[in-house]
Image (spheres, rainbow, N blue to C red):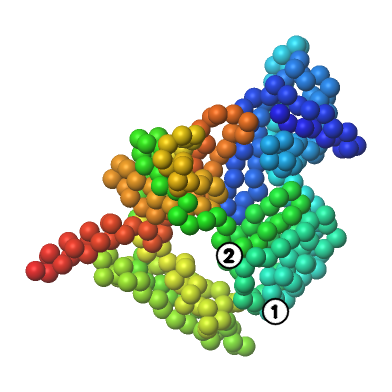
Amino acid sequence: MLEVTDLYGNSEPLTNHSILENNFEINTVPDLNFTVYRKYNERAFDMITEKCVITEVESKEMYRVEMFSCIGSGDTIGYNVQCLHIVKDLNNKLLTSELKGSQTIKSCMDFIVSGTKFTYEILDSFSSFDFESLGNDFALNVLLNNILVNFKAEFEVTNYHIVIREKIGIENAFIFVDGFNINKLSFTNDSTNLATRISGDGKSGDNGNPIVTTTYTSPNADIYGIIDAAKYSDDSTTTANLKVRLKETLQDVPDISITLDYVQFTKGNIHKKKVERVGLGNAGYVRGKNIDVYSRIQKITLYPQSTKTPVVSINSVKGTLSKTLAHLKEVKKGVKK
């Protein structure tokens, strides 16, 4: 069941809707999609208008209707409804000023939530970041595109409360085995952007020339040889963190994208041992179809209030191909012999 609240604050239960589709992705606004027909919800149906609020009653999370389209006619008229999490309301605020220079993540969060309904907490420690300019944009855009990116942070949200962490989720949360607790496992191995060496420039001097320049070479150059990546440049990056940024930027292993259907067990050893904790940002092992990687859930589609199997996406697995790399190293040793 859902609850619809109109723009005047009136609420009604919304029942007999289609299966709910609830999409979550790291550092992205969650969405909720469903179909509903008037004949089953005469009172609530007419309350569905632009910007009304839909509450998913199990999680108690609120979503704002952003788009709905009419389907059918007469007694069978209905709506396909697309909603975004209420955190999208943060973009109702346009930041007409800006912050410059060294800023803490707290000062940045204070800047974007001031005067709104939103609250926040920061659960990890972050170094200050030197901004050339932060602001002159909508508040949510600044959070997603500037604050989280520059502080290398991630966020979770519960209605109007934002939680900032270095990384959401937990480690060793699951073991997915094809044919046992997952099915429809598919993956792609893309080495198009693989590189093993990267050079970069940081802060510039008064003459416009970079005063910070360095090069990072990955240990995987021993396997793949020297493959140069595009040059990195960021005028806000200092000497202290330029090499860290280069290491984070370099894609020195193939980019693996995995999708799978997770089979929820109510019985069985894995469930009893609580090995499977499937949630956004959680990390664990995926095994099967010639793949054995430690990876992280980047995206998950849930179907609340139904038994439909969740769909899990694990993208951009980096630095987890231990078996592949070990095999290549052994091959290289054999060739040398």
Q: Residue 64 vs residue 248: left or right?
A: right
SS at circle 1: strand
- Given residues 215 and 182, the one toward you in this image is 182
Q: Quadrant of the N terminus?
A: top right
Q: Quadrant of the C terminus?
A: bottom left
> Which residue was labeled with disc 1?
101
Residue 164, located in which quarter of the rendered image? bottom right
- Given residues 299 and 308, the one toward you in this image is 308
- Given residues 208 and 20, the one toward you in this image is 20
The dot on residue 291 is: none
Q: 261 above or below 202?
A: above
Residue at 75%, 37% (x, y): give it: 55
Residue at 62%, 38% (x, y): give it: 22
Dot in front, 2 or 1: 2
Nearest to N terminus: mark 2 or mark 1: 1
SS at circle 2: loop
Residue at 22%, 59% (x, y): give it: 327
Q: Residues within 10 Å of mark 2 (few under 14, many from 20)?
A: some
